[in-house]
Amino acid sequence: MKKKELKIVTIGGGSSYTPELIEGYIKRKDELPIKEIWLVDIEDGREKLEIVGAMAQRMVKAAGLDWKVYLTLDRREALKDADFVSTQFRVGLLDARIKDERIPLSHGILGQETNGAGGMFKAFRTIPVILDIIKDMKELCPNAWLVNFTNPSGMVTEAAIKHGGWDRTVGLCNVPIGAMRTAEQVLEATEKELTFKFAGLNHFHWHRVWDNEGNERTKEVLQKVYDPNSTIEVDEVKNIKKTPFNYEQLLDLGIIPCAYHRYYYISDDMLNHSLEDFSKGETRAEVVKKTEAELFELYKDPKLDYKPEQLTKRGGTHYSDAACELIASIYNDKKTNMVVSTKNNGAIDDLPYDSIVEVTSTITASGPIPLNWGKFEPGARGMVQIMKAMEELTIEAAITGDYNKALHAFTINPLVPSGKIAKELLDEMLIAHKKHLPQFAEKIKEIENR
Ligand code: G6P
């Protein structure tokens, strides 16, 4: 029997993205009988929670809704009898992300939020916390859905499902939403007139497009978006420089890459841009820290009761359309097609059956059902397999604190030069992040006492 009054919890409720989430719920007020929204944070995020929480309460009131919006540092109180739990937390906050980006770059190596050394360290910090949350959920809300937005979203989702045993976990990202909007723009078509199939990993997916006459339009999108002679201007995620791909390589690839593929397909340009930003003290994390401060100043305004335009300066904008649509589609068995991180179950031939992949799926009351993708061509197949191997080693290392496994993940990650530098970088970053890496405590002490 469907519950008529929903309790929705957001862990990381003090995030600057929260107004986006609240707006998404308000937009779906007729599909989701929400009774309570609980915004949860930790002591370090208390001030942010109070500011953005008051903003959320104003937004709900301005929408004329009688939902209760609770703010709490007590995760267990919030989780009790929750129906949906969304997660959007950043362990170590933005200062940890600044280290993830600046330390590799200080060695001339790419430093990025979810890719390379930075992404592996965000996984090391985050995975033990998601498993801890799941332990509470097993006791307090055993039937809830876990909607994960916390990056690196694919690895965190894999850890939750494969290691935490929480099958009702769905990983989300906003990048595919933007990619579908781009295809609609260049093909001058609406969402209903196109069919998309995405496949790969979070921040490492490709996609194909068909129209309602059954014609594949993928090559046309590649040409209109990436041909250097194309004059069409398209938007891309705000956090990635729109450095041009090698168009001829994309023509051979034959499927549409995601924005993050730039770090892999044109590593030199992307590293040079990052090194330039680094030298000016303007890595993405440092820029975001300024944007965050501006946003929280705005949110303090007791008259502001709607999501400000400035939030679209963040890379994760529109993510709430993903989170709220997913919840509405599960609750109402809407069978909406969405791109989510979920169990492969054979959708992608080239990846392990039980691995978590990012694929177009039909969202039902029993969760995502992936559309079949089949096989990748050799180039994409090779890359996605090495990336999944790196992810598996990273997840294992995050859970066990196994240094050898962490070094192995560093060594095979395409964005970390292998060899002595990989070890030096791993050791330096372990020490820099030690406050948030209890699982590596012993090894860190050994490294410090060398
Ligand atoms: C992208 C990704 C998110 C990522 C964000 C970074 O769109 O989908 O996973 O966290 O942008 O944006 P930021 O503004 O924090 O650099």
Image (cartoon, rainbow, N blue to C red):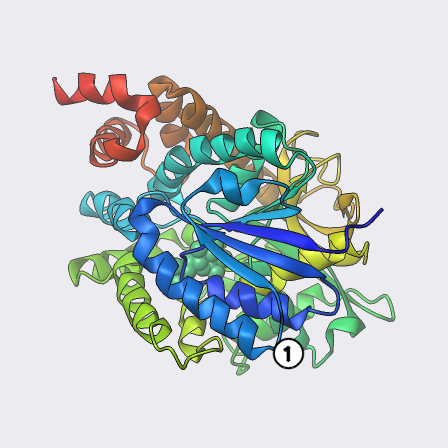
Residue, disc 1: 185
Q: Position of residue 36 (x, y in %)?
A: 60, 57
| In the image, farthest residue toward the left | 449
Which residue is at 34% across, 59% downward? 48
Tell which of 32 and 206 is nearer to you: 32
Picture quadrant of residue 180:
bottom right
Residue 395 on image: x %, y %: 47, 29
Judged left or right of residue 252, residue 156 is: left
Image spot of residue 150 (x, y percent) = 48, 47
Q: Could you say which is closer to the camera, residue 305 or residue 441?
A: 305
Q: Is mark 1 within 8 Å of ligand 1?
A: no
Q: Give the residue at x 68% y 38%.
A: 168
Q: Quadrant of residue 349?
A: top right
Is residue 265 in view?
no
In front here: 353 or 210?
Answer: 353
Count neighbours of disc 1 (C-alpha within 10 A) and say few if under 14, some if 14 to 19, many if 20 or more: some
- The answer to whether residue 234 of the structure is visible from this angle is yes
Q: Is residue 340 left or right of residue 365?
A: left
Ligand 1 appears in which quadrant? bottom left
Q: Residue furthest right?
A: 213
x then y, percent, for residue 380: 59, 45
In the rendered image, the vertical position of residue 55 relative to residue 126, given as above or below? below
Front residue of 171/403: it is: 171
Q: Quadrant of the C terminus?
A: top left
Element type at mark 1 = helix
282 versus 62 height, above or below: above
Compared to residue 355, the image places residue 69 above or below, namely below
Q: Residue at x 73, y 72 (%)?
A: 191
Q: Residue at x 29, y 47 (%)?
A: 44
Residue type, label 1: Gln
